[in-house]
């Protein structure tokens, strides 16, 4: 069925006009729930800047949605001015005349544009054609000139000078001249499972090479990846006729062979391949469980002149980090220092936070050795620590920029806002640790965007219940110009409400943990509501996700509209707090923060009489699917209904790097049992008492479906009833079946936790913001 976003007042939310019947949740309830999904609410949010882009000369352009349509804005920090980027009404008239179609100033047929002719003209595309518009007289002429600058190319990495692109062919690395189109083979020995720059280890697969260009575009740092002895993973398509077998290298915890990389540099001027004079490194990175998690070749940094490459070698279990510097002419590698930790090392939360400074022979290093993530200054010659840069009970999450001339670092950090330890602020500090300055002092979660010169940045700050304010600041944090204040008045008038921030104590009774809670719009404090606990246990993330203002929070508010209180809690062992907080469940991730979830819900119920602890449901996806099944099996008297989606139920069946990082290397005792076995969900399936729905995509190349099949087999052996949804040809996120799964999730909780009937086969039909459809 089709439906529109219907203002809440039309349903009479203040009264009983839409109250659920005694035995069913109505079609109107489901329609109201769907109206709370992001694709509906976004149309009611005004003056929120998007698409911000800095141009040469520190000029800023962005667009904002208004009740009428889209406006394009230009900002000049030097003049402290903000104005329309161009006359949209004149442009609409000109484009209408040129294309034969009718446009208005608020409904132009494009959402992006480029400047040309020294910003005297713009290039726009519509209807498959590109036009050049003179901003003096708004004359429109068809444009057939090449793009101003090539910045990307499919399955290739473009050089810094924009003239060359490196790509993989037949397991070797090739070079394409983007001016002439000529290609050149750079390596010749590549073969299947032993290729150059390949991006195909574990859950990560693509045809794009993993490499790092030197600043002068004359050299490439990459590797040859050896997977010849690595075990395979298999998936089979569902189709009429013979299925297609998909296989790829997917190492598992405890495997004797994992993907290894042989580091090297390719000199494009003489064609030489210079291997680094070290043993191969495990396919590991300091930021996450993939060597390309930052979007490029992780833990690699060139010196400005291209003579050196600094890099980290990460041990298989992530306990040892070796800082090394390679001579790119000889391949000789110098060992500078190493850090060894008892659990797992990570170089930051928002980015890789080490920097090599060859000009001063120094290294900015990130470490949690004082129990908090901080920056330190090291001597690059001796490998000795020179001084502490940051210190205190907070976490540096990401280095934004380093000014070597002024010896100043700008970085993001959490834990400094007294309102909430998860709110991000941005700071500057000197290399010697002096003059720590909060550049974004307002309460809330801050998101910034620096200009190319680093002299200016936009700052948008908000809270889960407070919409964003965007301002322009200079590098010292001084506010130069107010830009936008997000307006949600139309959204509120239509009935939307923000989630409530909550804080409770963890299972230890003393550690503060934080979260958000959703209640129905037609909330009645005299009623009792079942509780749905959404969970993502990490340990590389948490349930809440972003702490900025957003109406894009899955279907939590939508689910609340069907008659539930929905609770999201960041439990212990989630990141962004102290190292000891993060490591509370190291080696035993089956805890899944579940004791914290239970303790927190009980505290909330003690505060709020409307929360019914006799009816508690839980759901999650991926790691949350793992946690959901664990909740149902390990705490069967607390959780009554669970929906486990795509869970990594046995981490011996999930890719090697994730488990070995957070659990440790797989080890067997004298009985033959290993340290992973006691954490596998199938071993506890016999404890199930409530209703459990399992779901998985059968072509899931992230968490293979065999994880869920192991649980199914154990349930059947124990003679336990369960429900199942499979997506025969879907990957990890279900793709086009995402909203089908969402609707089935609503149905399952309504029927089994609320105890009511629901509309049959309700259709969640997605539509785009009418202001941005072109």
Image (spheres, rainbow, N blue to C red):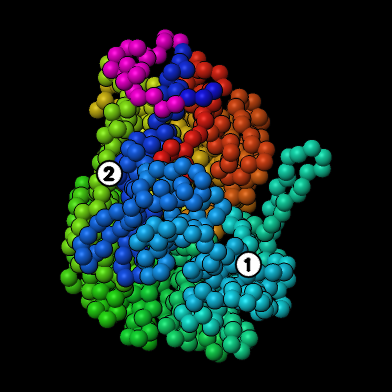
Q: Nearer the viewer, residue 582 or 342?
A: 582
In the rendered structure, the answer to whether residue 270 lies left or right of residue 592 reads: right
Residue 713 badge: none
In the rendered structure, the answer to whether residue 417 lies left or right of residue 197 reads: left
Name the residue at 22% across, 74% down. 430
Name the residue at 46% across, 42% down. 102
Q: Quadrant of the N terminus?
A: top right
| x then y, percent, for residue 679 | 53, 45
Under tag 2, what secondary structure?
loop
First reached walking from the N terminus: tag 2 or tag 1 = 1
Q: Is residue 20 magenta?
A: yes
The residue to which callout 2 is attached is 486
Check disc 1: other Cα within 10 Å, few if <14, some if 14-19, many if 20+. many
Check disc 2: other Cα within 10 Å, few if <14, some if 14-19, many if 20+. many
| x then y, percent, for residue 121 | 40, 63
Name the residue at 64% across, 36% down. 727
| x then y, percent, for residue 333 | 51, 85
Q: Nearer the viewer, residue 263 or 488?
A: 488
Chain part drawn in magenta: 4-23
In the rendered structure, the answer to whether residue 428 lies left or right of residue 4 reads: left
Residue 198 badge: 1
Name the residue at 59% across, 50% down. 702
| x then y, percent, for residue 545 | 38, 46
The correct choice, above or below, for 44 with respect to 397 in the image is above
């Amino acid at each position: 069925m089709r439906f529109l976003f219907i203002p809440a007042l039309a349903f009479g939310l203040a009264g009983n006009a839409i109250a659920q019947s005694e035995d069913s949740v109505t079609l109107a309830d489901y329609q109201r729930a769907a109206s709370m999904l992001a694709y509906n609410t976004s149309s009611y949010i005004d003056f929120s800047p998007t698409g911000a882009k800095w141009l040469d000369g520190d000029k800023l352009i962005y667009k904002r949605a208004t009740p009428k349509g889209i406006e394009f804005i230009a900002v000049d920090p030097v003049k402290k001015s903000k104005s329309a980027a161009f006359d949209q009404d004149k442009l609409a008239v000109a484009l209408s005349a040129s294309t034969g179609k009718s446009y208005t100033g608020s409904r132009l047929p494009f959402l992006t544009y480029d400047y040309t002719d020294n910003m005297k003209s713009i290039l726009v595309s519509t209807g498959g054609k590109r036009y050049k518009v003179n901003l003096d007289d708004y004359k429109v002429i068809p444009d057939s000139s090449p793009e101003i600058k090539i910045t990307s190319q499919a399955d290739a990495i473009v050089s810094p000078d924009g003239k060359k692109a490196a790509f993989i062919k037949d397991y070797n690395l090739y070079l394409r001249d983007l001016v002439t189109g000529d290609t050149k083979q750079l390596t010749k020995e590549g073969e299947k499972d032993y290729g150059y720059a390949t991006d195909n280890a574990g859950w990560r697969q693509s045809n794009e090479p993993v490499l790092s260009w030197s600043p002068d575009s004359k050299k490439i740092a990459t590797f040859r990846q050896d997977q010849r002895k690595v075990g395979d993973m298999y998936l089979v398509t569902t189709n009429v006729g013979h299925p297609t077998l998909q296989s790829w290298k997917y190492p598992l915890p405890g495997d004797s062979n994992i993907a290894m990389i042989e580091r090297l540099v390719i000199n494009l001027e003489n064609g030489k391949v210079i291997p680094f004079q070290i043993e191969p490194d495990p396919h590991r990175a300091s930021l996450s469980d993939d060597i390309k998690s930052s979007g490029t070749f992780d833990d690699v940094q060139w010196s400005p002149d291209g003579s050196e490459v600094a890099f980290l070698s990460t041990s298989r279990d992530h306990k040892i980090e070796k800082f090394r510097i390679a001579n790119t002419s000889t391949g000789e590698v110098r060992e500078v220092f190493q850090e060894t930790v008892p659990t797992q090392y990570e170089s930051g939360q928002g980015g890789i936070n080490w920097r090599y400074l060859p000009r001063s022979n120094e290294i900015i290093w990130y470490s949690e050795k004082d129990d908090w993530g901080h920056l330190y200054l090291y001597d690059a010659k001796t490998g000795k620590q020179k001084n502490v840069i940051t210190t205190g009970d907070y976490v540096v999450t990401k280095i934004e920029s380093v000014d070597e001339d002024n010896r100043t670092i700008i970085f993001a950090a959490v834990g400094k806002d007294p309102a909430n330890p998860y709110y991000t602020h941005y700071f500057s500090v000197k290399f010697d640790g002096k003059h720590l300055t909060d550049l974004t002092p307002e309460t809330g979660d801050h998101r910034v965007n620096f200009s190319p010169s680093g002299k200016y940045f936009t700052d948008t700050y908000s809270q889960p219940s407070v919409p964003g304010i965007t301002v322009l600041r200079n590098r010292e944090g001084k506010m130069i110009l107010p830009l936008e204040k997000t307006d949600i008045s139309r959204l509120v008038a239509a009935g939307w409400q923000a989630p409530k921030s909550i804080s409770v104590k963890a299972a230890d009774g003393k550690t503060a943990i934080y979260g958000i809670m959703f209640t129905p719009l037609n909330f009645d404090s005299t009623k009792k509501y079942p509780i749905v606990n959404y969970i993502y246990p990490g340990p590389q993330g948490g349930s809440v996700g972003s702490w900025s203002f957003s109406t894009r929070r899955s279907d939590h508010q939508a689910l609340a509209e069907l008659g539930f209180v929905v609770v999201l809690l960041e439990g212990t062992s989630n990141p962004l707090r102290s190292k000891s907080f993060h490591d509370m469940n190291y080696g035993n991730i089956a805890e899944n923060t579940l004791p914290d979830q239970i303790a927190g819900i009980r505290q909330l119920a003690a505060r709020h009489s409307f929360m019914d602890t006799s009816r508690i449901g839980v759901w999650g996806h991926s790691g949350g699917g793992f946690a959901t099944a664990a909740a149902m099996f390990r705490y069967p008297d607390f959780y009554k209904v669970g929906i486990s989606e795509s869970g990594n139920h046995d981490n011996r069946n999930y890719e090697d790097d994730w488990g070995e990082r957070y659990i440790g290397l797989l080890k067997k005792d004298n009985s033959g049992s290993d340290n992973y076995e006691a954490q596998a969900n199938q071993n506890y399936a016999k404890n199930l008492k409530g209703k459990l729905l399992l779901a998985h995509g059968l072509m899931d190349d992230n968490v293979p479906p065999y994880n869920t099949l192991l649980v199914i087999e154990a349930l059947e052996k124990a003679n336990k009833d369960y429900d199942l949804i499979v997506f025969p040809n879907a990957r990890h996120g279900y793709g086009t079946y995402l909203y089908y799964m969402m609707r089935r999730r609503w149905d399952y909780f309504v029927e089994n936790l609320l105890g009511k009937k629901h509309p049959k086969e309700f259709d969640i039909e997605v539509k785009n913001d009418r202001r941005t459809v072109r």
